[in-house]
Image (cartoon, rainbow, N blue to C red):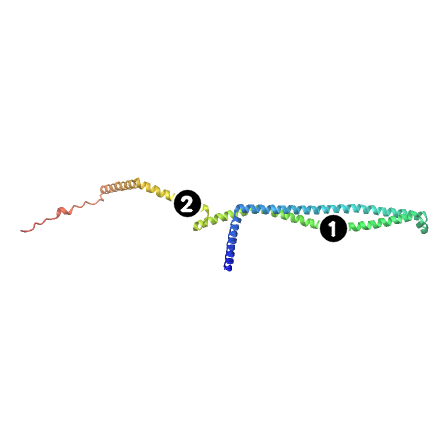
Amino acid sequence: MFNAIGRYFRALGYLLTGQITKATDTLNTNPAVISANYDRIISDKRQRLTQYKDAVAAMIAQEESKKEKVRALTEEMGKLEKLKAGAAAKAKSLVDKYAGDPTAVKNDPEYLKCQSAFKDFSSTLAEKAKRVSELEEDLKVLVNNASGHKTQIMSLMRELEKLKEEKHDAVADILSATEEKQIADMMTGISNDRTSEELRNLREMRQKAAAGAKVSRELAGLDTKKAENEFMEYAQSHESDNEFDQLIGLAGKKETSQSSSVDVKVPEA
């Protein structure tokens, strides 16, 4: 018993599922629904494309920021190069001052100051050079990626425009196919279209109206009068033909009645 109940509900579920699927298919082939679906898809794609463009714009902004950092670091490196040269030049002046005496030069506080500055400038310059190298590598990747994304965005924009055109073509194709199907179904007598039913009703009404008019004419004696007129026209035409034949000698002689030449015998007594 429980198995039978289970099979019943399963069958009912299959039936409902089939009806829902059929209804969904019918709804999805409606031109208005198709147009609305295309509008939704176009809107979604446009929104995603806008997000994509914003992401690429942020990437380009990052690229510009890194380029600016490279320019700033390059300027700082140029300044450090000059500072290094200045520190070396000042130390060189000490060498000239002490006639090249290493001990005297190194014992001078200015020498240690120049030496310390030169080392700091060199160390900072090396760090900045390394940072510039890293930024330049990042820029190569960013520029390459941004270029690829720009190309992709242009392709997506063209696809979006084609989708707008496809929407109108799809609606037109559905309408054309629907009309062709309705005409074919109407010709084969399997159409359930309301338009076909209305046409059938109009044709039946037309036939009934014609039949009613015929009955009215017969009841009013119109058909009888029409027949009499046709017979009268035929008779007049026939008399005219006979008169014409007599005038030209084609008409035959009238046969005499045989009853006038019959001998009557009297029976003998």
Mark nearer the viewer, 2 or 1: 2
> Label 1: which residue?
138
In primary-sequence order, the first of circles 2 and 1 is 1
| Element assignment for label 1 | helix
For the point 87% across and 49% down, the residue is: 118
Q: For the residue carrying disc 1, how many other residues have a C-alpha within 10 Å: few (<14), some (14-19), or many (20+)? A: some
Percent from the top left, x then y, of residue 15?
50, 54
Q: Amino acid at mark 2?
A: Asn
Q: CA distance from mark 2 to mark 1?
A: 78 Å
Q: Is residue 142 visible?
A: yes
- Of 147 and 221, which appears nearest the observer? 221
- Above or below, 1 against 94 in this view is below
Left or right of 162 in this view: 102: right
Tell me the kind of residue under disc 1: Asp
Q: Label 2, on which residue?
A: 201
Residue 176 drawn at (x, y percent): 50, 47
Q: Say which residue appears at 74% left-offset and 46% top-offset.
A: 65
